[in-house]
Amino acid sequence: MSEVESPQYTAKDFSSDQDVRWCPGCGDYSILKQVQSVMPEIGVEKEDIVFISGIGCSSRFPYYMNTYGMHSIHGRAPAIASGLKVANPDLSVWVITGDGDALSIGGNHLIHLLRRNFDLNILLFNNEIYGLTKGQYSPTSPEGKVTKSTPMGSIDHPFNPLSLASGADGTFIARAMDRDPKHLRDILRDANSHKGTSLVEIYQNCNVFNDGAFGQFTDKDTREDTTVFVEHGKPMIFGKGGSKGLILENATPRVVDLTTGEYTVENLWVHDKYNRFKADVLMRCFEVPEENGLPRPFGVFFETERPCYEDMLHEQIDYAIERKGKGDLDALLAGTNTWEIK
Amino acid sequence: MENQISEKSTRVREEKKDVTILFAGDSGDGIQLTGSQFSNTSALFGNDISTFPNYPAEIRAPQGTIAGVSGFQLNFGSVEIYTPGDLCDVLVVMNAAALKANLDKLKIGGTLIANTAGFDKKNLKLAGYVDMRNPLENDFHGKYRLIEIDVTKLTREALKDSDLGTKEKDRSKNMFVLGFLYWMYNRELAPTEGFLKEKFAKRPDLVESNMAVLKAGYHYGDTSEVFTSRYEVKPAPMPTGKYRNAMGNQALAIGLIAAAQKAGLSLFYGSYPITPASDILHELARHKNFDVRSFQAEDEIAAVTSAIGASFAGNLGVTASSGPGIALKGEALGLACILELPLVVINVQRGGPSTGLPTKTEQADLFQAMYGRNGEAPIPILAPASPKDCFEMAFQATKIAVEHMTPVMLLSDGYIANGAEPWMYPSASDLGEIAPKYAAKAEDEVFLPYKRDAKGVRPWAKPGMKGFEHRIGGLEKADLTGDVSYDPDNHQKMVKIRAEKISNLAHVFPAQEIDQGEMGAQLCILTWGSTYGAVKTAVKEMLETGYSVAHIHVKYLYPFPKNLETLLKSFDQVLVPELNNGQLVRIIRSEFLIDAKPLNKIKGMPFTSIEVKEEALKFINS
């Protein structure tokens, strides 16, 4: 791409001519809006942006973006995006997927995409339910979840998507939610700035089949006690009026009360997104807050630098050309052993 | 060759038109290398050749057992050669198991060369000779010409001054056999010497030891009193031109590279390792300086979908596999079909169903290629006839995929993939052009991604092209715009449009020719894929005898060339030999209402020309 001034776009420029067809009240609307708002800020020409999705409610997303896009098949968006990125590393690629698409039918592609570290962004809309097929439990639904396919409650143990991503050596791992647009936009910008595969899990409310699944994290009454928004270099404070904090004791997080005088902000765990071990501990804060009191963290958990697959692939091609010269088709056709019949 | 090889003047020189040799031994005996060296040397000498490696599914099956026997058959001649031969003139066995597994392939009166060291009690037991009677002491006399050589002992003797360990010395015993056969057929050692120097560039001691054993084998033939005749197989009268040896998978890979270059496209190859297709990946990965992007994906589905992603971005997306992998790719092929993006899909068929016979050949995936997708998803199907033809058909498959914006299926098989033959290779400038149809429009014009040209082909707009931003997907799309559409009439229209685009290729494909014989013959033998050679040989012999027979070989299987029906209807009878339970024959019957008859072989092995001829004669005589 040539060095030109950042294009002057508005969010509206990224809205396609298609009617958005999610259910009224769906959390996807907010995510779409935040993505369209952030796009003008990333400094990429519209024609160099590609949205790739699989199957599911969230995967309709590309149809609504006035960029290049592909609504592909169930679970395969990461693999399609891999080929796309190899073919043209200059593109800004966004994979749109859901909990079923990314973690169930497409689980294999997701982990391999993360370990290869293609430079692209994955937005994983997690609503803990299968919406498009009308309400079966998903690989992130909690145990005991009663759905159409689990009338006696789910006996499947759910994935912890962020720990899974960490296990696959993801280089940027973050969590956001549909109900906090400003924070979501911040995370989207960070994800875009990261060179490598950025995984952003977005809690998204399915108001038809799983309404309020994340209510405790989004409702005004509870959210301050159940969530902690982590920022690099800042202590982990949460609770009403900043009344609580997290400390790290023997590699185990614990909630402390900041109002009694026993603990001050100085004692708290300061978030270091470059520390893999601590990030893993943070991702493990995944229990139901009422049960152990630990809040659910949001923000960028982990970030590190690692070479990207597509860059290394093209370096090998460049090196091969440097060493052997640009491919000579006649030499290839002839091979090394020839003879002539006259 | 530096050394002068003397020859005893008393030797009889016997001239032969063609010879079939089968090398057989343990899978660790270097049989494939021995066979391919003899092939290369004979090809360089000017013989026409055809080869057939036949190896076990296990990498190192228990030594000395039947399961571990590896074979390499080659047919070379001073006449045109179309198959690796039916029965062998010479069978080389390195141990008892190799003999037991292959003796039925030796002609009566043929030559049996046996490594006696492989016939000790242990080997006899492993091979399952229960009475422990050495078959070499049997009454082979009169039935076969038996040449017993203690290869192991003679190899060690040849290397008695070498510092190599016994194990390493024994590893070169295949060179003794090769040397001996070079003597028998009066071949030069120089090509193999060149090969060894390249292979062991960093181990000059191994070049030396292997050459010592190769020469020892050669001299053994010359000096031993046992052997009275040498054979001469003169160069074949092949068309003038430049030749090289080509293996099927290798020629296929080169065809893909050539096509991508001619189309001005970068080649993206997404693949998951599978026998017998992996060699295409290996070959392509070697040619990165042709801007080949080979991608070993996490599974078969990622292999094909990454290729679709690459094609969307403007590369030539290619994926290959064998039947089980193609089954996994099925849904993605439907996606490529509805997206209308270029995609070349190669199936190097093997014995099925399921894992089946991974290292054996079969043609049982034609139905899969034709019908193996959900919904109405027609895909053009092409099939090469022989190893060298893989080049041409890979080139043509790419041309169709790119110029008609469609996935194309190329059906090779294990027999073609691993077989080799001399190839009169083209020069780059002889190859046809491939012209991608990139999107173009006036600046203020709205881009319609599914607006078609006269051939029904939609434009290719790749990300990065300003003003062509568009969304495509697996949902049914409205005509012209490509927007999602659930309209019933539109769906029917789009299904018909996509089908017609593919069926119209019948007018693009070359007209079907009769390979041998004339229209209106009493019998037509109709073939596809790797059965070409055996049937060609059979029909040639039948025509020479004066039978009314013809041979038609179809390389374009979907759609069929437009004149195929007329041709087929001119014959009294049509026989369709296939390495399956009857697939092309059923398609022919249903397409053309012709009472075509099947000839099926489902043994993981190719037809012999004798088998074809025997069946064909039943039709002609009846």
Image (cartoon, coloured by chain):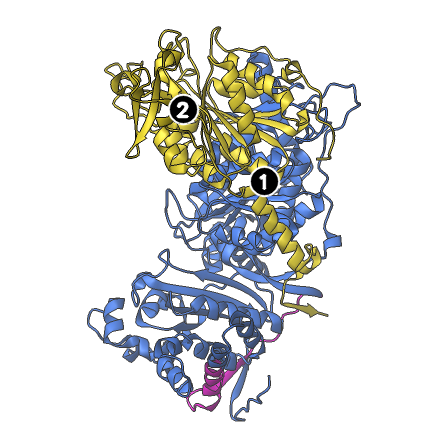
Chain colours: A yellow, B blue
The residue nearer to you, when weighing A185 against A82, is A185
Chain of the residue under the numbered disc 2 shown in the image = A
Q: Relative to A17, does residue B270 appear above or below in the rendering?
A: below
Residue of label 1? A86
**Category of crowding for the residue at label 2, using alpha-carbon neighbours closer than 10 angstroms: few (below 14), some (14–19), many (at least 20):** many
What x and y, as percent, mark residue B317?
A: 59, 40
Q: Which residue is drawn at 61% across and 21% down?
A: A39
Position of residue B369 measured from the top left corner of the image (x, y, whole percent): 50, 38
Up the image or down, B168 lies above or below B483; here it is below
Distance between the alpha carbons at the discs numbered 1 and 2: 26 Å
Q: Name the residue under label 2.
A: A100
* Left or right of A199 on screen, residue A41: right
* Residue B544 visible in the snapshot: yes
Which residue does the image show at 66% across and 26% down from the upper left? A43
Give the SS element for disc 2: helix
| Chain at tag 1 | A
Q: Residue lying at the far bottom in this picture: please name it.
A: B9
Crowdedness near tag 1: few (<14), some (14–19) or many (≥20) residues, C-alpha within 10 Å? many
Q: Which of marks 1 and 2 is nearer the N terminus?
A: 1
- Give the answer, above or below, for where A7 lies relative to B198: above
Amino acid type of the residue that numbered disc 2 sits on in the rendered structure:
Gly
Q: What stretch is highlighted in magenta?
A: B212-240
- Residue B493 lies within the magenta run: no
The relative height of residue B620 versus residue A41 in the rendered view (above or below) is: below
Mark 1: secondary structure: helix
Front position in the image: A162 or A144 = A162
Is residue A146 shown left or right of residue B398? left
Residue B558 seen in the current view: no
* Kind of residue indicated by mark 1: Val
Q: Nearer the viewer, residue A219 or B315?
A: A219
Question: In this rendering, do the residues under marks 1 and 2 share a single chain?
Answer: yes
